[in-house]
Image: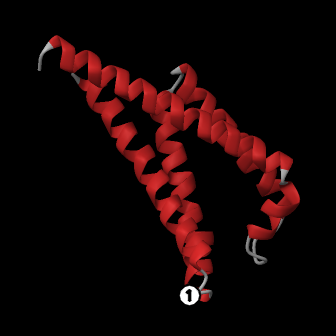
Amino acid sequence: PSRWETRRSKIIMLACNYALGFFLTTSGIQHFLFAPFVMTLIPSWIPFREFWTYATGVMLILSGLCLITGFKRTVALRFTAFLIFSWVMIIHIPRAFFTVRNVNEWTALCEALAFASLCFVLSRADLNKKSR
């Protein structure tokens, strides 16, 4: 690849990391601002809903800040991919399948899958970059 293509790739990767980092950070902050609502999204069989609401908010904020600063970016991306994918399995799939006609639940499922996939793809790109 030419120098321009290499530079353009780096700029795109940085923009993706900054945008995703900002999104994750603001999503984490929203867990604190709208905690009562977030707690309603956690299934009733999971204990300590308040703890998980705030713990998830902290994890999202830390992951977002790692992406923005570049500190442990690959680890943060991997962690976030698994975190969001666990929500897909525990929260989004059951909610979508038990309320089949609720388009919002299906949208939330697809969004969560997309974000988990994005984090995983970006982490692989980081690993590939480091192995060169």
* Image quadrant occupied by the C terminus: top left
Position in image of residue 69 (x %, y %): 56, 20
Tell me: 37 left or right of 116: right
What SS does tag 1 mark? loop
Residue at screen point 35% across, 44% down: 121
- Amino acid on which disc 1 is placed: Val
Residue located at (77% from left, 56% from top): 52
Q: Name the one closer to the observer, 34 or 80.
A: 34
For label 1, the crowd category at 10 Å Cα-Cα, with few meaning under 14, some 14 to 19 and many 20 or more, is: few
- Position of residue 71 measured from the top left corner of the image (x, y, whole percent): 54, 21
Figure colour scheme: secondary structure
> Measured along the vertical axis of the image, is residue 117 above or below residue 92?
above
Q: Nearer the viewer, residue 28 or 48?
A: 28
Q: Which residue is disc 1 drawn over?
A: 100
Q: Is residue 118 above or below residue 22?
A: below
For residue 59, say whether it is visible: no
Q: Position of residue 91 (x, y in %)?
A: 63, 70
x 42%, y 24%: residue: 14
